Image (tube, grey):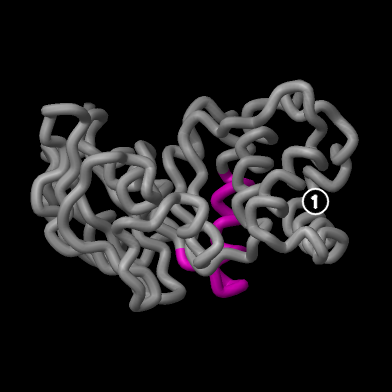
Amino acid sequence: MLKIDKLNAWYGTSHILQDVSLHVDRGEVVSLLGRNGAGKTTLLKSVMGLLKKTAGAVSFKGADLLGLPAHARYRHGLAYVPEERRIVPGMTVLENLRLGIIASGKAKDERAIIERIAATFPRLKERLGQEAVTMSGGEQQMLAIARATAAGPDMILLDEPSEGIMPVLVDEMFELFLALKRQGTTILLVEQSVETALGISDRAYILDQGAIVYSERADAMLADPAIQERYCAV
């Protein structure tokens, strides 16, 4: 579904990603692991079209993405949940969800989309009228994910979804990711909690200093503490 070939990315004159190649097949959960500063967020932003300077090839469902703006990639079936969530203050949970629906170009289907989101995210169903920023961090993260699913994306890019979240909500959130997978959604996951990420993944890549240094089946990587220590330990 997603194929990245020799992707390079820069912030100004800083060359962050260096000839990164990876793929994610339809229906997979694939983890992208590595220490802070390895380039994981830069890779997701590059795939989503949020960096000005990139080179290489990125294809999604067989279509070339480079050159397309982020909103066009979203409407093509690719969604992104940033680490900082970007919940809009002063707006309710429902209003934040509507932003995702408007961006998807499916406003005429709003009622059905809200009903689908409420069924998938029962915790949010109880809070549709609540100001979104008054919810807990974990609930706000669920809202960010729910908003990204408004267009019914084929694939979601998730950046550090468990950051700052209570463990009980982390467990609930990762069960949700498995539910999305069962519904047919493909996921590329950036996550600092290596064991948690590998526990729901099919495969994983490790990024170090802007380059892919290791790739393996998730279960094999989970059973290899030496590799985790070498590339992922703080």
- As displayed, is residue 228 above or below residue 73? above
Label 1 CA crowd tier, 10 Å (few <14, some 14–19, many 20+): few
Left or right: 79 with respect to 18? right
* Residue named by callout 1: 122
- Between 234 and 150, which is closer to the camera in this rendering? 150
Query: On the rendered image, what quadrant is the N terminus found in?
Result: bottom left
> Within the image, what quadrant is residue 104 found in?
bottom right
Residue at 63% x, 47% y is 172
Left or right: 106 with respect to 61? right
Residue at 52% x, 57% y is 74
- As displayed, is residue 111 above or below residue 164? below
Residue at 42% x, 47% y is 196
Under circle 1, the secondary element is helix
Q: Is residue 54 magenta?
A: no
Magenta range is 171-186
- Between 8 and 138, which is closer to the camera in this rendering? 8
Taken as a whole, is the magenta stretch helix, strand or loop? helix
* Residue 24 in view here: no
Q: Is residue 181 magenta?
A: yes
- As displayed, is residue 170 above or below residue 132? below
| Place of residue 80 in the rendered image (x, y in percent of width and height, measured from the top left) | 49, 49
Residue type at numbered disc 1: Pro
